[in-house]
Image (spheres, rainbow, N blue to C red):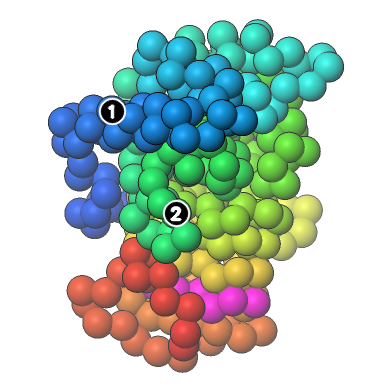
Amino acid sequence: MSRTEYRAAPRTMMPPPTLVVSATRNDTDLLWQQLRAAAADVAQREPLLQPRMQALVLERPTPAAMIAAVLARGLACSDLPEAALATLMENILDHDAALLARVATDLTAVTQRDPACPNALHVLLNLKGFQALQVYRIAHALWREEREELAFALANQASVAFAVDIHPAARIGAGVMLDHGTGIVIGETSVIEDNVSILQNVTLGGTGKEHGDRHPKIRSGVMLGAGAKVLGNIEIGSMSKVAAGSVVLSNVPPHCTVAGVPARIVRQHRGDSCPSLDMDQTL
């Protein structure tokens, strides 16, 4: 299957659970207001950080401008200058309300799920998993516009800067958390639905040199533990959990935990449990 054919016929996603993706427009507006207020507070209390708060948040008139400034600062190199990157990404975010809403939902998801996270400002400025995911979102928008060379360039630079490797053709929903981020690999035909949590060193990969649709499909509410490897065109069912260090080579039903090498079912979940939100690493 060619790359163009794959884009033209995307796989239908399952409906997400009602979690952070249900945030209203008022919730989103409040999020950005709180983020700006937090930056002003930091600028007042920490003189060393004042220029950073001003340049990345307080002097930026819109959420799109804030996000673009932060991502451009992290990605910039000698032949991808910060100002040009910021302009490119701000334009993409400004013209895609749905993309900007997904960024806000990701911010909320990380703030709610990570016990080490004090507020959304910390997520935006300091968490490279979040930053890498937003670079992917912009690269994916470029990919859909058939600007593939630029999409690949951003994805490659994100891998260098953040140690997170996401193919720009992958399809990733909202309310996703890449916790820590380091070592995460997400292949070209991967699908990740809404409200998924992925910890460090997770691989969503193929099983060899096959072409076409060859990567995992991660359904809503799933948690993938640190170091988990999910390989091939298989499905991790909604509200399931893959234990740390597991290698998954076959489909996983909804509402269960799998563990081991190769992974096997070790537990069935309650119907109302959501591993991606609970973030419970135990078996």
Q: Kindly identify the amino acid type of the residue bearing the numbered disc 1.
A: Gln
Q: Is residue 3 left or right of residue 173?
A: right
Which one is in front, 211 or 186? 186
Q: Main secondary structure of the magenta part?
A: loop
Graded by Cα atoms within 10 Å as few (under 14), some (14 to 19) or many (20 or more), the crowding at tag 2 reads some
State the mark number for residue 33: 1
Q: Secondary structure at mark 2?
A: loop
Instruction: Indicate the position of residue 166 as horizontal and vertical percent values.
Output: 63, 42
The label on residue 151 is none
Q: Position of residue 167 (x, y in %)?
A: 64, 39
| Residue with the most extreme bottom position | 266
Q: Amino acid at mark 2?
A: Cys
**Magenta region, residue range:** 240-245
Determine whether, in the image, residue 203 is placed left or right of residue 19: right
Residue 85 among magenta residues: no
Does residue 245 show up?
yes
Q: For residue 117, which numbered disc appears in the image? A: 2
Q: Secondary structure at mark 1?
A: helix
Whether 243 is among the magenta residues is yes
- Estimate the x, y position of residue 261 in percent, counting from the top left: 66, 84
Identity of the residue drawn at 44% across and 81% down? 257
Is 196 placed above or below 171 here? below
State left or right for residue 118 relative to residue 146: left
Q: Residue at horizontal 22%, vertical 32%? A: 30
**First-in-chain label (1 vs 2):** 1
Residue 150 vs residue 277, the one in the foreground: 277
